[in-house]
Image (cartoon, rainbow, N blue to C red):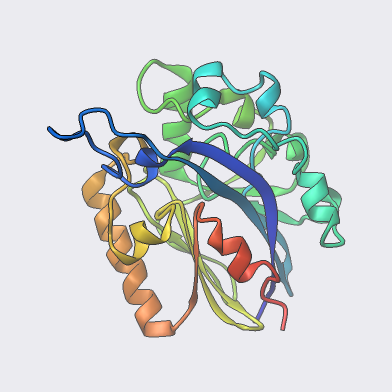
């Protein structure tokens, strides 16, 4: 079954480009103090209108991220100044929807720029799909001094109707979830049959086009497992070659310019 898919603009994060493109700027003997590049990165969600239900893909940053909700060191590194202006209600209403219309949520992963709207589904029966390895690693990271600092317990430590995914999974007919370990242990992507043709949701497997097209690695702070990341990338590129799908990357601003009208025929 073919879906209509809306791309929701959730604002922009500013950060050092070296996080996203490893070694983008490096010191040399002749230039020991080069200027760093401070870039802008898109934050988006998807709204998948499938005949079997309305699915929200990720929930974006918490609207108070810039007002002290995010830990200060994380906001210093990845500043999301317009999170409050581009909150979930605003993004949904621009497409004619509301939070109460959502039948299911799929979390690509639980980093704080993706899980900040989960509180809107706390105490409801709305299923929240997440990979089992992701859920375990998120709690391990947020509740101990180990793991990754990019998980923030107040985002996901709620009474949620978790639906745990193991490996790949067909969510609905024409909506396949893909396990893509590398950026995180339980990163999910998807292949969705839309009314405009196949869509390959690469997400944070590749933040930018250079990560996907050229295989330029992200920095180690954005990779849980470099080898797994490379293997997931090859898998996605083979799917694209086989299907001719549109490719939706994680944080490249060109995605909103290219696909801003969605897949709506």
Q: Position of residue 144 (x, y in %)?
A: 42, 16
| Residue pictured at 52% horizontal, 32% vertical | 78
Q: Position of residue 161 (x, y in %)?
A: 67, 42
Q: Quadrant of the N terminus?
A: bottom right
Q: Is residue 76 above or below residue 80?
A: above
Inspect this view and state whether residue 184 appears.
no
Residue nearest the observer in this picture, 190 or 11:
11
Total numbered badges shown on the rendered structure: 0
Answer with the quarter of the image where residue 261 lies. bottom right
Q: Position of residue 73 (x, y in %)?
A: 49, 19
| Residue pictured at 37% horizontal, 39% vertical | 19
Q: Is residue 140 above or below residue 184?
A: above
Q: Is residue 249 above or below residue 115?
A: below
| Relative horizontal placement of residue 76, taking residue 92 as reference (left or right) | left
| Residue pictured at 50% horizontal, 56% vertical | 252
Residue nearest the observer in this picture, 148 or 21:
21
| Relative horizontal placement of residue 105, taking residue 29 as reference (left or right) | right
> Furthest residue to the front?
30
Answer with the quarter of the image where residue 86 lies. top right
Q: Quadrant of the C terminus?
A: bottom right
| Residue pictured at 56% horizontal, 34% vertical | 112
Q: Position of residue 18 (x, y in %)?
A: 35, 39
Inspect this view and state whether residue 40 appears.
yes
Answer with the quarter of the image where residue 195 lies. bottom right
């Amino acid at each position: 079954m073919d879906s209509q898919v809306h791309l929701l603009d959730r604002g922009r994060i500013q950060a050092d480009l070296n996080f996203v493109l490893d070694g983008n700027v490096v010191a040399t003997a002749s230039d020991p103090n080069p200027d760093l590049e401070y870039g802008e990165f898109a934050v988006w969600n998807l709204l998948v209108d499938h005949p079997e239900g309305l699915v929200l893909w990720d929930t974006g940053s918490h609207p108070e991220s810039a007002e002290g909700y995010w830990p200060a060191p994380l906001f210093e590194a990845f500043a999301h100044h317009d999170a409050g202006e581009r909150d979930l209600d605003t993004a949904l209403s621009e497409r004619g929807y509301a939070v109460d219309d959502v039948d299911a949520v799929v979390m690509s992963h639980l980093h704080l720029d993706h899980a900040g709207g989960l509180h809107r589904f706390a105490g409801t029966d709305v299923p929240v799909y997440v990979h089992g390895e992701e859920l375990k690693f998120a709690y391990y990271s947020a509740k101990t001094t180990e793991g990754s600092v990019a998980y923030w317990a107040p985002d996901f430590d709620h009474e949620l109707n978790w639906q745990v995914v193991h490996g790949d999974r067909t969510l609905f007919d024409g909506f396949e979830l893909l396990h893509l370990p590398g950026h995180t242990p339980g990163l999910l992507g998807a292949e969705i049959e839309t009314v405009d043709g196949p869509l390959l949701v690469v997400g944070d497997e590749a933040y930018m086009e250079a990560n996907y097209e050229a295989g330029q690695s992200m920095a180690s702070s954005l990779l849980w497992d470099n080898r797994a990341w490379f293997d997931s990338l090859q898998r996605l590129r083979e799917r694209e070659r086989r299907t001719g799908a549109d490719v939706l990357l994680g944080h490249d601003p060109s995605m909103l310019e290219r696909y801003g009208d969605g897949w709506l025929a």
